[in-house]
Image (spheres, rainbow, N blue to C red):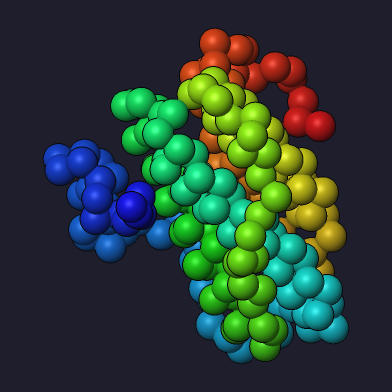
Amino acid sequence: MSFLISLDDAAPGTRRSFLSKSGLLLSGAAVALLAGEDALAAKTGKDGEEDVRILNTALGAELEAIAAYQLGAESGLLKKPVLDLAVTFQGHHKEHADILAKTIAKLGGKAVGAKEKYAFPTEKLKSQADVLRFAAALEQGAVSAYLGAVPLFGNRDLAKAAASILGDEAMHWAVLRQALGEAPVPSAFMV
């Protein structure tokens, strides 16, 4: 059973549906990541190898998140509308992974692939709340990872794009915390 999501699956009549069908849904970050190869390479320069390494680390985390949301969706533990939310978040991670892989290729690197198997704590996932806590922990980890990566990029456009993805991960984390009945934003600073 597959729970893949695409922009075309957006609810008819929604702003997201309209924008996806009109081709206007590329964020500034996506545009920066998809910049022409020459412009991207020129701005990256000698730091390009390090930027590719950072992008591949981010890509690996996005692929892990895709697999984790797939596990949650197929677990039978998520009920609507939480299942729909998980599939939507999985779609976001797929978009991140796609754009990261394309950017790595533009920089002359080789994108990492998904692992054959991830060490997820499946034995501890016995309820919808368990799956939500697991997903929230992954999203919190993604926020921390992107927060640490942003200042390391040699190319500032890549740093801005990573910061945009960081914002999306933070929103995922907040929504998942809210779904668990926890304070969605537990503190004034991201740590």
In percent of width and height, residue 34 lies at 52, 73
At horizontal 42% and vertical 51% (from top left) the residue drawn is 91
Q: Quadrant of residue 159?
A: bottom right
Q: Compared to 124, does 34 lie above or below?
A: below
Left or right side of 110 for 131: left
Residue 97 falls in image quadrant: bottom right
Q: Which residue is at a point 59% across and 35% down the rendered structure image? A: 135
Q: Which residue is drawn at 56% across and 46% down?
A: 68
Name the quarter where the C terminus is drawn. top right
Left or right: residue 40 versus residue 54 is: left
- Which of the two residues, 94 or 134, is positioned nearer the viewer here? 134
Instruction: Single out the residue that lies furthest toward the left.
Output: 13
Q: In this view, does 144 lie to the left or right of 59?
A: right
- Residue 188 on image: x %, y %: 74, 20
The residue sitting at 52% across, 67% down in the picture is 99
Nearest the eye: 43 or 11: 11
Q: Is residue 150 above or below residue 111?
A: above
Does the image show residue 57? Answer: yes
Query: Residue extending furthest front?
Result: 123
Residue 4: x and y in percent read 35, 54
Q: Position of residue 190 (x, y in %)?
A: 76, 31
How many numbered tags mark residues here? 0
Front residue of 127/13: it is 127
Q: Is residue 170 above or below residue 189?
A: below
Q: Is residue 171 visible?
A: no
